[in-house]
Image (cartoon, coloured by chain):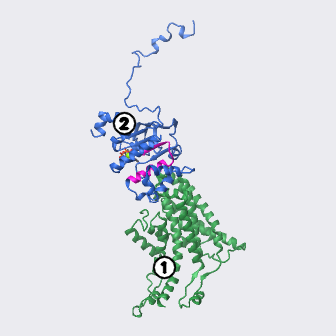
Chain colours: A green, B blue
């Protein structure tokens, strides 16, 4: 039973949380990578776009809750998602109209866009805090657990518990659906193909009669969806705090770059690489190793490689290693 | 006394109102470079212009292709051949001159609008979507069309059978010659009224080159006028109804392909003897 216990412990403390967190990062990184591939800049406002979209979802959720509308065992926030996405889309398209389009017309260099997005980030940032405040907001309702510690023990008779929060399960399911729809859109529809064509070769896209402004509009719409969904899932799973979303920028960018900027598959792979690295390195592995190793070799310490306070250092290290060894990322995106 | 000047004896013979020293209306000489554009389907007429705010690269350069014909532009590297093609496609700031398609002035149209008007263009470099499959490349070529594109795709596959076998492969994984076929195929997908090719045989082996030329002639036989830039001047001029030699952005020689091949000057400077 020892290896089984080790596996359950590992699943409980590392695999399940990392898969959920990885899905959230993957959705965030997909947004970053799409903007990079099509609009050709690193959007520093992405974290705050997520925060903004999530805020819209939370406000709508509260509205629904006070009207007595729920979603059964599922979080009401899922019902509020379309509204949040629509609000975020309006914000992004508005921003594009007043900020990015100006630089596009001037054919500004990418770094100009990056700096502009930094300004946009501060504006979103302030706006979100102004509306909903800087504090933690919890808005998850519905059933708390898919698999509870008690239920798992009763069902399997194992000593070690396995807990799967419903928000974790929802995160994974929603992420799979979103990714499937996104890939279907990019690979099967005329508009999706034109977006890939534009990302591949802008001049030739023009020569083929593809309208760049339309491609840009679709990109922002998709990014609004991805950012709001990623933010809402993260908020449901953990909690919503504007500053946390700003901090998420680092692991999200790390994920996008590790996977290869501009590559959607890469963004997903990168999200899981970062999530697993972060969770594994900051989790005390003593118990897991204790089950695997013979008594004599059992570790004394906690075998926690880094304290959780340093979790962002993990993204940073991976980012640097990738940039040094394989700047185009795992899936050969564009080198940075 | 009459007020009519014509009835006075001074009349229009009054030498005091003309400059003495004889007439100035002498017969001049015409240039021998005179591209005939009267029947042209597509013509870039007396184009002068360059990139952005930089200096002029084209100087009063005229390029035209007649209906159903093949026109070839040759010239040394950097002569402005590609620049001339881009100018005709509306990707250059023209300071003078204009572009006409089928008698209509299209100088102000954007490249996309020119595609919609029936112009197809294969640029010299990055002329395919490398990360898209061959089939998707062709689909993107037909992006502006809302009708059924399958017949057009079948035609392209008939012209370039190898593409049919490779239709699901990313175009970036094809050989140089196959890529050029994809590039030409993509431009054919709109079923253009005129096709512009910038060095379609760049970087392919002599055998593939001959085959590409055959294909181009085949396309031309369907009635599509073709304007192309070629590095392989001799072969290209052999199939050309009209040839242009550009030097430093100017028309240096113009004539039928045969005329240019026979021209001593052209032979010596551009065809290697
Ligand atoms: N995008 C550009 N911006 C500025 N100048 C350019 C650009 N492209 C070409 N030029 C300049 O224009 C001139 C003509 O270039 P062009 O590409 O038209 O030559 P070409 O005749 O097509 O040569 P090749 O046979 O090598 O293809 C060159 O001096 C080149 O430096
Ligand atoms: Mg050229």
Q: Is mark 2 on a helix, strand or loop?
A: helix
| Mark 2 lies on residue | B257
Picture coordinates of residue B58 (x, y %)? 40, 40
Asked if badges 1 and 2 are on one and the same chain, I answer no
Picture coordinates of residue B168 (x, y %)? 46, 59
Q: Distance between the residues labelled 1 and 2?
A: 71 Å
Give the vertical position of B180 relative to A313 (above or below): above
Q: Residue A279 got which mark?
A: 1
Question: Is residue B220 in the magenta section?
Answer: no
Q: Is mark 1 on a helix, strand or loop?
A: helix
Q: Residue B268 got which mark?
A: none
Chain ID of residue with mark 2: B
Q: Using the rendered image of the protein, determine whether residue A238 is visible from the camera's viewpoint.
A: no
The magenta segment: B177-197
Give the vertical position of B98 relative to B123 (above or below): above
Chain ID of residue with mark 1: A
Q: Residue at x 40, y 48 (%)?
A: B124
Residue A56 falls left or right of residue A314 = right
């Amino acid at each position: 039973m020892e290896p089984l216990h080790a596996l359950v412990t590992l699943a409980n403390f590392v695999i399940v949380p990392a898969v959920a967190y990885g899905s959230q990062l993957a959705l965030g990184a997909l947004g970053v990578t799409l903007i990079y591939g099509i609009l050709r800049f690193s959007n520093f406002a992405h974290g705050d776009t997520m925060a903004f979209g999530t805020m819209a979802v939370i406000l709508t959720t509260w509205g629904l809750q006070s009207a007595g509308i729920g979603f059964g065992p599922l979080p009401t926030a899922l019902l509020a998602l379309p509204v949040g996405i629509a609000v975020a889309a309006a914000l992004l398209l508005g921003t594009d109209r007043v900020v990015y389009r100006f630089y596009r017309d001037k054919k500004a260099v990418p770094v100009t866009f990056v700096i502009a997005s930094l300004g946009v980030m501060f504006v979103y940032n302030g706006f979100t805090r102004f509306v909903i405040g800087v504090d933690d907001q919890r808005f998850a309702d519905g059933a708390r657990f898919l698999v509870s510690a008690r239920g798992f023990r009763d069902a399997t008779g194992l000593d070690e518990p396995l807990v799967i929060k419903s928000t974790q399960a929802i995160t994974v399911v929603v992420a799979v659906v979103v990714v499937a729809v996104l890939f279907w859109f990019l690979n099967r529809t005329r508009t999706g193909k034109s977006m890939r064509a534009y990302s591949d070769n802008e001049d030739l896209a023009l020569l083929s009669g593809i309208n760049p402004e339309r491609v840009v509009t679709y990109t922002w719409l998709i990014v609004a969806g991805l950012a709001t969904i990623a933010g809402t899932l993260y908020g449901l799973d953990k909690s919503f705090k504007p500053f946390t979303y700003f901090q998420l920028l680092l692991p999200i960018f790390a994920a996008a770059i590790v996977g290869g900027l501009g590559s959607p598959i890469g963004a997903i792979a990168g999200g899981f690489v970062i999530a697993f690295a972060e969770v594994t390195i900051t989790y005390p592995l003593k118990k897991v190793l204790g089950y695997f190793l013979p008594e004599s070799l059992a570790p004394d310490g906690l075998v926690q490689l880094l304290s959780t306070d340093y979790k962002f250092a993990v993204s940073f290290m991976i980012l640097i290693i990738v940039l040094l060894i394989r700047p185009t990322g795992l899936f050969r995106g564009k080198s940075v | 006394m009459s007020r009519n000047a014509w009835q006075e004896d001074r009349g229009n013979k009054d030498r005091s109102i003309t400059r003495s020293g004889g007439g100035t209306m002498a017969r001049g000489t015409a240039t021998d470079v005179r591209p005939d554009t009267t029947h042209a389907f597509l013509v870039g007429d007396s184009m002068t212009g360059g990139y952005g705010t930089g200096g002029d690269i084209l100087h009063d350069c005229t390029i035209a292709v007649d209906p159903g014909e093949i026109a070839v532009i040759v010239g040394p590297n950097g002569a402005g051949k590609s620049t001339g093609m881009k100018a005709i496609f509306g990707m250059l700031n023209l300071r003078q001159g204009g572009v006409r398609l089928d008698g209509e002035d299209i100088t102000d149209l954007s490249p996309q609008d020119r595609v919609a008007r029936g112009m197809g263009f294969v640029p010299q470099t990055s002329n395919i979507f490398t990360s898209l499959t061959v089939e998707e490349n062709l689909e993107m070529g037909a992006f502006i069309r809302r009708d059924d594109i399958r017949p057009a795709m079948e035609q392209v596959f008939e012209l370039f059978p190898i593409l049919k076998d490779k239709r699901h492969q990313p175009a970036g994984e094809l050989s140089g010659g196959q890529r050029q076929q994809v590039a030409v195929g993509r431009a054919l997908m709109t079923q253009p009224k005129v096709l512009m090719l910038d060095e379609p045989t760049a970087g392919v082996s002599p055998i593939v080159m001959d085959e590409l030329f055959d294909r181009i002639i085949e396309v031309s036989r369907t009635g599509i006028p073709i304007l192309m830039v070629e590095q392989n001047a001799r072969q290209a001029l052999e199939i050309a109804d009209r040839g242009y030699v550009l030097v430093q952005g100017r028309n240096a020689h113009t004539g039928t392909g045969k005329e240019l091949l026979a021209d001593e000057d052209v032979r010596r400077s551009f065809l290697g003897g």
